[in-house]
Amino acid sequence: MRSHLKKVPLQVWIVGSASLLITASAAMFFSVFALFLKSLHVKSANISLIDGIIEGLGYLFKIFSGVLSDFLQKRKLIFAIGAFFTAFSKLLPILFFTAQSAILGRILDRLGNGLQATPRDALISDYAPPNLRGTCFGVRQSLGTLGSVLGTLFVFTILKFVKDDFYTIFAVASVPAVVAFLLIHFFVRDARRSQEEGQPQVKIKTEKVPFHLSDVRRLNRSYWKTMLIVGLFMLCRFSESLMMLYGKETFSLSNSAATQIMIVYNLAAVFSAYTTGRLESFFASSTLLMSGVFITMGANFVMALAGSFSLFMVGAALWGIQIGLMQNVFCAEISKFVQPELRGTGFGIFYFMTAMSVLIANNIGGQLAEKSGVLAFYYSAFLSFLTCLFLLFSRRGKRV
């Protein structure tokens, strides 16, 4: 394992570190967003719908940034602009401290995330050696999710000692994003690969490859089959806010205790993200995808049937494991199937498919949770089962 880490290019570590800082900033905001709205007496169904719309917008921003990064061939610039928006978004709730300002701030935060995510993943693809793609994406995903852990730990600490101090959390959340912007500006470099897909070569000036909509037809059948799996599976992925609010209300938790759900979830995702990168060297992607679907079903049933907070936390950990596993496998598959000059667009379409599915999942999940929290988990388990059937059917043809 250490030998693989030593082979990971320095630029992957730098991009991953910037991702860590950006996700730490976003996690601080996200961890208290639902709790803050709940303190203003917003219904859980409305919170879930708002979260779904905002997440959907964030994913739609990603396809725009993907096309833009392919056209400009300046992934670093868009990456940096995304970090800037992530930092700026925290100013609104600090200045106005209302539900409307928090929602607008969250939209700007997702705009920043949407702008930076696609060129970030494309940069990883550009710098990752072909035999280490899974490991490189695992490193990036692990560092990014570690940022989420650090962000939620900070929120937990603040809420534990100062009850409902949302102002301090909003204020400090902008700091990591500012540092990420500086790191990207001074240390990240755009890369170009040779035609043989060898080691990345950084050049001072290169010829741009123009992008046209007709180029989408160059994406192959394996890529589109993966997108079908993405669209179906993401229908079961409602927001973690719904999971946290359900745990808080079911087990009568304080705001500080409720953030422990996010901490356990993020820790499990960190472990899963890097482990998945290593497992891709030994198992077929179809096997890993099927494992992720089964883990998702298990997570839903555990949380729905949990009679204690400890058991519910086991379900939250399983949910985190499938997040890290599925995201990493999907990204590695896209990197494998898409030509280098179209990777930004390939990732953008992936995020577009995710946006549509997540919006539907949050709308349905929120409505079901308003009637009975367990119904949302059973809905997710059912969609996981349908995804499992689709994967089994797909295995009859060419392996995904």
Image (cartoon, grey):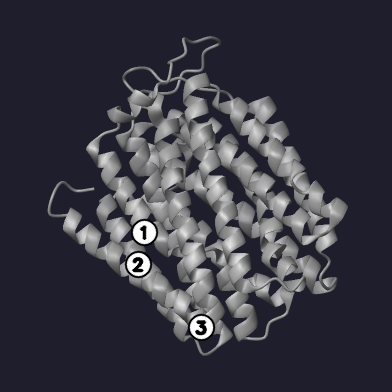
Q: Say left or right for 51 vs 198.
A: right
Mark 3 lies on residue? 311
Figure check: 194 above or below 223: above
Q: What residue lies at 84% left-to-right and 66% top-to-bottom? A: 165
Can the viewer see residue 263? no
Q: x and y percent of residue 318 in the render?
A: 45, 70
Along the viewing direction, whichever of 213 and 197 lies nearer the viewer: 213
Can the viewer see residue 75? yes
Cα–Cα span, label 2 and label 1:
7 Å
Q: Dot 2: what SS? A: helix
Pick whichever of labels 2 and 3 is earlier in the sequence: 3
Find residue 112 and report its image quarter: top right
Residue kind at label 1, given as amino acid type: Phe
Along the viewing direction, whichever of 170 and 279 lies nearer the viewer: 170
Pick whichever of labels 1 and 3 is earlier in the sequence: 1
Mark 2 lies on residue? 383
Residue kind at label 2, given as amino acid type: Leu
Query: Do the CB atoms of the residues marked 2 and 1 lie less than 8 Å apart?
Result: yes
Mark 1 lies on residue? 233
Q: x and y percent of residue 141 in the render?
A: 51, 48
